[in-house]
Image (cartoon, helix red, strand yellow):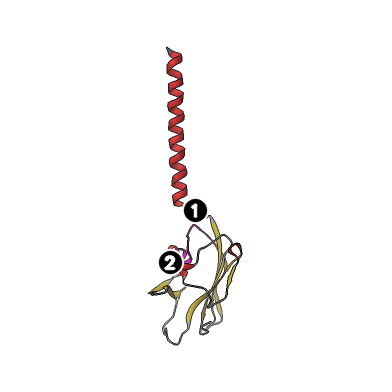
Amino acid sequence: MKKSILPKIIIAIVAILVVIGIVFASHNLIKGQKGEKTITITIENQIDHKYLMKDKKFETDSKTLADFLKANQKDLKVTFEQTKWGPFITGLMGVDSTNMDKGPWWMYSYDSPSQNLNLKVGAAPAADKINLANGDKIEFVFTNNAG
């Protein structure tokens, strides 16, 4: 009789381990892994001729640039204005756009070698349209040059 119970116990243990493995794997797939991408951020104030941040690397699991900025809103002191084209960056690192008609404004370039994209300042779409990939470089520029 002991022989007939042992296989059932082994099967039950294996089944429990399989269920735990499936739950763990599906949780990681849905959530994504922390820090799965490394991106490099530079923030330049061209009006005052200062770099506020230069080539700082961030690990992120954010899907879009807008998601990344929202996740780091406190550290980067980011402010947005929602427009019909998407979120418009109005402030970074305590430097704010005060005259949306005349500038200066926050703009950015986006370089993503893995996606074969190299968008110059003024050519990049709204931050919620930029899908981040590992190795991306984003340079934010406070400028009077509208691109």
User: Looking at the picture, which amino acid does disc 1 mark?
Assistant: Lys
User: Looking at the picture, which amino acid does disc 2 mark?
Assistant: Gln
Tell me the quarter of the image containing the N terminus: top left
Seen from the viewer's position, the closer of residues 29 and 33 is 29
**Quarter location, residue 137:** bottom right
Query: Quick check: 5 above or below 125?
Result: above
Closer to the eye: label 2 or 1: 1
Seen from the viewer's position, the closer of residues 49 and 28 is 28
Sort mark 1 into few (<14), some (14-19) or many (20+) by Cα contacts within 10 Å.
Answer: few
Mark seen at residue 34: 1
Residue 80 place in picture, x, y as percent: 40, 73
For label 2, the residue is 73
The stretch drawn in magenta includes residue 64: yes
Which residue is at 43% across, 41% downward? 23
Magenta span covers which residues?
58-70
Q: What is the number of callouts on the image?
A: 2
Q: The residue tagged with tag 1: helix, strand or loop? A: loop
Query: Quick check: 140 above or below 10?
Result: below
Residue 38 place in picture, x, y as percent: 56, 59
Which residue is at 46% across, 33% downward? 17
The stretch drawn in magenta includes residue 120: no
Residue 7 place in picture, x, y as percent: 46, 20
Which residue is the extreme one toward the bottom?
A: 102
Mark seen at residue 20: none
Sort mark 2 into few (<14), some (14-19) or many (20+) by Cα contacts within 10 Å.
Answer: some
Which residue is the extreme one toward the top?
A: 1
Q: The residue tagged with tag 2: helix, strand or loop? A: helix
